[in-house]
Amino acid sequence: QVQLVESGGGLVQAGGSLRLSCVASGRNFSLYHMAWFRQAPGKEREFVGIISLSGANTRYADSARGRFTISRDNARKTVYMQMNSLKPDDSGVYYCASTLKAWGTASRPADYGSWGQGTQVTVSS
């Protein structure tokens, strides 16, 4: 298992950008596919995007595609999510999570073994 710590959240106006980071500690970070989820008040935690263990592949929710970009640096045990053209609907707590499940099979929160504590993103209109 890895331990995860997110940072980079904050308050931004609609149309603005934020870059989230997730630093891992523990062994074998490069063996995990890494994902971002978000959760708004009163709503279920939802998948935002995922990057493969090598960084060669990414997949995004429809709501994020074209605006968000996930990358990773295995040497620094860090995964990033660049969020552009932010909208008020993007507000929520953003979590990074790790999974050992095969690529393309981990879409639910229950598929992920480790989670960070979350970082708050608030987009004002």
Image: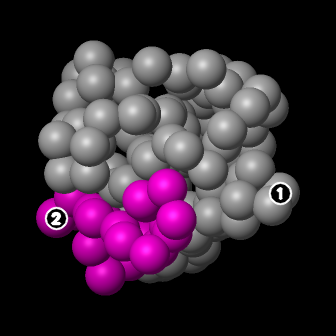
The answer to which image quadrant residue 106 occupies is: top left
Going from N to C along the chain, the mark reached first, 2 or 1, is 2
Quadrant for the C terminus, please: bottom left
Q: Is residue 51 visible?
A: yes
The residue lying toward the viewer, choosing from 43 and 59, is: 59
Question: Residue 58: x percent and y percent?
Answer: 35, 68
Q: Is 99 drawn above or below residue 121 in the view shown? A: above
Q: Residues within 10 Å of mark 1 (few under 14, many from 20)?
A: few
* Magenta-drawn stretch, dominant element (helix, strand or loop): loop
Question: Residue 116: x percent and y percent?
Answer: 62, 26
Q: Is residue 109 magenta?
A: no
The answer to which image quadrant residue 45 occupies is: top left
Question: Residue 23: x percent and y percent?
Answer: 76, 43
Q: Regarding mark 2 in the picture, which secondary structure is present there?
A: loop
Q: CA distance from mark 2 to mark 1?
A: 29 Å
Give the residue number, with chain letter if any, for mark 2: 62
The residue lying toward the viewer, choosing from 78 and 19, is: 78
Left or right: where 101 falls relative to 98: left
| Range drawn in magenta | 51-70
Which mark is on residue 119?
Answer: none
Q: Residues within 10 Å of mark 2 (few under 14, many from 20)?
A: few
Q: Is residue 12 visible?
A: no
Give the residue number, with chain letter if any, for mark 1: 76
Residue visible at 28% across and 25% down in the picture: 111
Q: Amino acid at mark 2?
A: Asp
